[in-house]
Image (cartoon, rainbow, N blue to C red):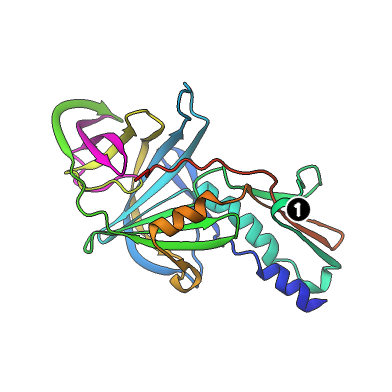
Amino acid sequence: MKKLIIACLCCISIYSFGQNVVNINGTNVLGPGTKAAQKVLDSATLKCAYIFSKKKEGTEKPYRTDTMILDIGSKVSRFYDPARISRDSLLSDKMKNMGTESIKSVSVYKGEKAKDLANMPGTIASPSNEGESYQIYKDKSSKKITVIDKVAASGDKFSYEDEIGTLEWQITNITDTIQSYACQKATVHFRGRDYTAWFAPDIPVSDGPWKFAGLPGLILKVEDSHQLFVFSLIGLQQLNPLQPILTDDPKKTIKCTRAEFEKQKKKQGAGMQINTNGGNVIISDLPGVVLYTPMEVE
C-alpha cells in the first residue's frame, strides 16, 4: 500500500515555489521563493509589473487579465506569472506535506474519468485557464530564449530553446506618454501577428514582456493588431538588494522543440485538483477542456 501511495504522489509533476511579497508601486505582488533544486542565472536589478489581458476574436472585453513580472538582470531576464506559480505551489505543498503514514487510500481520476471536487471541503485546484504557466528567459549574450512551461494534461514540465534572432522593428516618430514616461512607437510582424509597441528611450533597457526585446528602451506596452493580447506596464521597481533570477533544474524538464511543445499544449487538460478527507486522498484532473489560443500562429 505504501509503495502505491508514493507512486501516486510522484505521478504529478508540479512547480514547487515558496511565496514572497514584492511591492510594485504600492501594490503587493507574490513572487517566487528559492529552492535548492533551482539554479541562479543572474541577479535582477529591475522588476517590472505588467497587466496581461486576453480577449477572444470579435469580443469587446478581455476574458482574462493577469499580473506578469519581468525581472531584468545584466545577463538574463525572466518573465512569469507569480500568482499562477503560487497556485500551482499550493498543490505541490499539499502533496509534499502529506505523510504516507496518515493516508488510508488514494484515488486518481484522469482524462474522461475526471471528477469535479469543487464542492468537497478542503479541495485545492489549479485550473489551466487561470494565469500563465510559462516562464520565459532571455539570454542577452547568446540572444537565445528559453521557455519552460507545464502542460496540465500530463503534469510534465517542458522546455525549449527559441532562437528568434533580431526582431525587425520599424521605429516611428510617433510619441506618447505611458506611466509618466515619454514613449516612442514601433511595429513588428512576428510569427503570424502584427504588433505595436511603445518603448521608453529614457529607460535604457532593451527588454520587454513575453518574447519582445530589441528596442532602444524598455517596452512599456505592446499589443497585436486585433488587441487579443495586450501587455501594459503598471509599475517599476529598482531592486536593492538585488534579487536572484532563478530557473528550474533543467534535468527535471522534458526537452523539446517549439513545434513539439505546441502540440502538447493543444492537448492540455483543464487543470488539476486534490482533496484530503480523513486520510482519503482524491486526485483528479479538472473536467472539461481548455481552448488554447497561441500568440504564435506560424
Q: Is residue 201 visible?
A: no
The residue nearer to you, when weighing 5 against 262, is 262
| Residue 36 percent coordinates (x, y) | 50, 72
Secondary structure beneath dot 1 equals: helix
Can residue 121 be seen at all in this image of the molecule?
yes
Residue in the foreground of this view, choosing between 54 and 236: 54
The residue identified by callout 1 is 113
Residue sitting at the far bottom: 3
Instruction: Please give the name of the residue rendered at 49% of the width and 49% of the height, measured from the top-left corner.
Output: 82
Instruction: Name the chief secondary structure element in magenta.
Output: strand
Front residue of 178/277: it is: 277
Q: Range of the magenta residues? A: 180-209
Residue 280: give x, y in percent of width and height. Answer: 84, 61
Where is 15 relative to 114, above or below? Answer: below
- Looking at the rendered image, the quarter that the N terminus falls into is bottom right
The residue under label 1 is which amino acid type? Lys
Q: Is residue 87 magenta?
A: no
Residue 168 at what x, y percent from top left?
18, 44
Residue 219 drawn above or below residue 267: above
For mark 1, does the 10 Å Cα neighbourhood hold few (<14), some (14 to 19), or many (20 or more) residues? few
Q: Classify residue 229 as left or right of residue 114.
A: left
Where on the picture, by quarter, is residue 11?
bottom right
125 versus 107 height, above or below: above
